[in-house]
Each structure stands twice: as C-alpha cells, then as structure tokens.
Image (spheres, grey):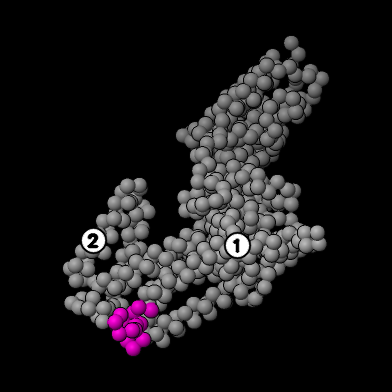
Amino acid sequence: MKRFKQPKKVSNKKNKDLNSNNQNEYAAQSSSQLSEVSIFSTIDKNFGFLNSFLGKDIGLIEGKYDIFNGKIQIGVVYIASIADNQLVSRQVIEPLLRGRFDLNTDFNGILTQIQSKFIYTPDIEKTSEMKQIIDNLFIGSTVLFIDGIDSALIIGSRKIEQRPIEKPDNEAIIFGSKESFVEDLETNISMVIKRLPTPDLCFETFTIGTLSRTEVKLLWMKDITNTKIVEEARRRLKSIEIDMISDLGALAELIEDKPLSIFPKWRQTQRPDMVAKCLSDGYFVILCNNTPFVLIGPGLFWDNFKTMDDYAEGSIVSSYLRNTRYIAFLLSIIVSPLYLSFVAYNHAIVPPPLAINIAAGREGVPLPSVVELLILSFAITIIREASIRMSGAVGFFIGVLAALVIGDAAVTAGYVSASVIIVVAISAISAYAIATTVMVIPSRLINLFLILLAGVLGMFGLISGIIIILWHAVSLESFGVPYLYPFVPFDLEGMKDTFIRAPIKLLKKRLNMLAPYNPNKINNEKHDGE
C-alpha cells in the first residue's frame, strides 16, 4: 500500500516552546500572545493546545480519523453547543471517509484537494494561525487538521437556533408587514435584502468587544446616502474600544452625539419595512448580533412621530394621525406644569367656574399641588415599570390594582385631589401615543423638569423651561445633521413629510442633507406630460 511521505516538520521558536508535553506551558499562554502562535504539524499537539487554552469543560468535541484507505490521518474539532453536529458528520467526516484520493497529488496539496472535492459546504477557508482557529470555534465553525501539515481548514458549521419571526412587540400597525427582526443577524439581513434586492445595498462588518466579539453590520445605499455621514459612522464604530457590548443601546451610546442629552439621536425599530424605507431615503442602519432591534441614523426629532401606517393610508388621514401624535407629545409635557402654574400662581387666567371646581376638589388636601404632581408622576413611572417587568396577567393585575388604589382610594382618603389625578393621567396616556418608545421616557423627564420650574416660577418658569428645551434641541446634531432638520434649517421639500404627509406624488425629493447625490424619489415629469 502506497503511503505518502510526510515532509520534515518545521516550527518556529514560539511553537517549539509550546510543543512541550507539559500542559502547563500551553495554559500559560495568554490571549494577547495568541496571535504569535502558529498551528502545529501534529494533530495531538493541536488538540493539546486547544484543550489547555480553552479548557475541557467548554465542550470541545475532538476526533481522529484515518481517511483514503489509511494513508492520511485527520483531526476534527468543534464546540458541541454551537456547532451543528449533523452537518459535521454528513458534510465533512462522511465524505472524507468514503472518498478516494488522487495518488499523484503532492502531500502539501492534500488540503487543497479536500477543500475542492470532498467538503460539501461553501463556507471554508485555510489558515495557519491558531488565533483564527480559536476565534472561529467560538462562532460555531469546525476545524480540520491533517497530521504532518501545519495548516488547517476552517469549515462553517454554526448551529442555527432562533425563535420564529413574529409581530413587533411595541410597533404595532394596522396595515403593512407583520414581521419583526429576531436575534439572528443573518436572518435580519435576509429580511432587509428581501425588501431591497439591489446591488446598491452596501454592507460593512465590524467586530466589537474584546470579550463579546459582537458582530455588527453597517448598511447604506450606494449613490443615495451621504458618504460623509457613512464615513463618520464607520469612524465611530472603528474607534470603539470596549470588552463587551451587551445590547444595541450600549452601542448607540458609544457612538452618538452628546450622549448625556435625553433626546434620542437614533431611531430604534424592530420593523424590516421601516428599515428598508429609511435606507431608500438616505439613512444608514446598524444591525447587531443577538438583538432583535436595529438602529437607524441619523436620528431626527420628527422621525419619532412617523409610522409605516402613515404611508399605507391616505394623505389626509395620515396627516391627521401624525398631528395627533404631535399634540399628544405636547400634552404629555405641558398639561401638568400648565395646571400647576394656573393653580399656584396665575389664578386670574383660569375661568371662575373652573377655578371654583378646582378649589372645591383641593379642599382638605394636605400636600401642595407641586408635590402632588411630582409624587403622582413618579408613581406612574413605578406602575409602568412594574407592569412591564411582570409578565401577562400579573402585569395587568398590577396596573388595575394601582389604578384603583391611586385613582379612587387616594382621592377618597383626601390625600390628593381629583383634578391632579385627571391631569397626570392625561399626561401619562399622551406619552404613549408617540410613535417610538424611545421618546416616551424623555417626554416624562421633560414633564418633571417643567413641573419643577412651574412650581417655583409659575407661568414664567414654564415658558422659560420650554425655551431652554428648544434651545437645547436646536443645538443638537446627529452625525452632522441638525436634530430639528428639515424644520431648522428649513427645507421645503422635507416639510412635506414632517408635520403632514403630503400625497405620494408630491413627495418627489429625499432630504438634501441625507441624500445629496440622488435626491429624486420618483419622476413625475412623465406622468405630468401624459
């Protein structure tokens, strides 16, 4: 039986140190030194290094096999919990055990022949670096060593486990798609490509976190999205130096403008159709592995009041509903401090019949109005948190119980007035009419800030607070785009889809700051001339 003569094994000084039979020498190698380690030419030494470096309890599966009638020995290793065991067996090991090798092939060409003729998966690459081996083991790949060769094959074999695609939890709409993103990055990418099947859709991949090794993808539309904005997003993603990214919110805080501002400089969504629309309008998108949410940037203030239903219904209906959301936002921040300024300072502004009813309701209440408002506003936040954290019927029960105790018993006992209960309820309910959940808590914080100013200075404090908030909002930017654009600075084309939603035929242009290279959405000239 002809057997290949293996070449003489050559190793560098670093590998000579690591080739020692003493397992403690393997364990002494740190992650920072791993980039200097090359693959060994024997299977046993490779297995020994991996076991010592990763530990046996991680779930390494190792196997050695004689293939091609016993002429060659291979070693296969993967992590059981994240690799697909059946894929490895059927598409890697079985073809090699049954295969016939070309006897005229040089020994060093074995890897090339295995890669081209016997491995039935397209995701395969050759490497001679131990660091690349370990990095790929942690993402579910399988590594194939050959005895006598100091290179290995990395074979994609990740086990895909994900929950089914369901409806979005907090972005429900009447019309449009019912799909939402999931925790698997590749699935999320597929849902975007399905809606934008064009080569103009560009991708760039980043790995963030020295420990978490979180895969992040930056998406934008070529010849539409402003390249300066994309370059700034790319620069900020590359500049992140952190050990772990826990979720998308942490990533957003690391790259957003003025992270101490309460205003969200991102649009966070679960909806693939919203992502596709924003990409076509010139925004960029950031997708992150292990999270069902997506970041859309630059984040503009007015985007928090737009939904996909706005483009599924008629212009008049959509404009009415959008302005309802704007009014709800104003009510959520102004109703409570406005009531307080009337009651505590500016009595003459209140109509006499209303003033008499308010005074009668406050009879016997021991607390000042400003204290009532602050306590009840904070209590609403507590109720919301308790309802969210508890699942299903328990959360509903907490909400009902809190409403009965605070709404009825507190008024009956004379601790708070009925007028304050009504005002706080209007303010809290209005906050949840905003299209995006990331704007709910900022509206509550603005409300508390204005209550404090109105409690101290009355109407003057309320007006001063509104001016301060507007000044702060005007000073904000998101990736170089003014936060209140297209209102400040003013852009007539952009205003057609800000406070109102003009008919689709009139929405001809994209926002100039976002899409300066291809501003035309639709070409109406042909239709106008027919």
The boundaries of the magenta stretch are 338-355
Residue at x 25%, y 73% (from the top left corner): 417
Is residue 335 left or right of 259 when viewed as pictured? Answer: left
Going by the numbered disc 1, the residue's amino acid type is Ser
Query: Which residue is disc 2 drawn over?
Result: 405
Residue extending furthest toward the bottom = 348
In which quadrant is the N terminus drawn? top right
Q: Percent x, y for residue 485?
A: 62, 71
Residue 8 location, x and y as percent? 73, 28
Judged by its main secondary structure, the magenta piece is helix
Count all numbered tags in the image, as a single digit.
2
In the rendered structure, which disc, 1 or 2, sits on the residue that comes first in sequence?
1
Q: Amino acid at mark 2?
A: Val
For residue 480, what is the image quadrant? bottom right
Secondary structure of the residue carrying tag 2 is helix
- Residue at the spot x=64%, y=41% of the render? 132
> Which residue carries the number 1 mark?
315
The residue under the point 59% across, 59% down is: 314
Compared with 162, 259 (above or below) is below
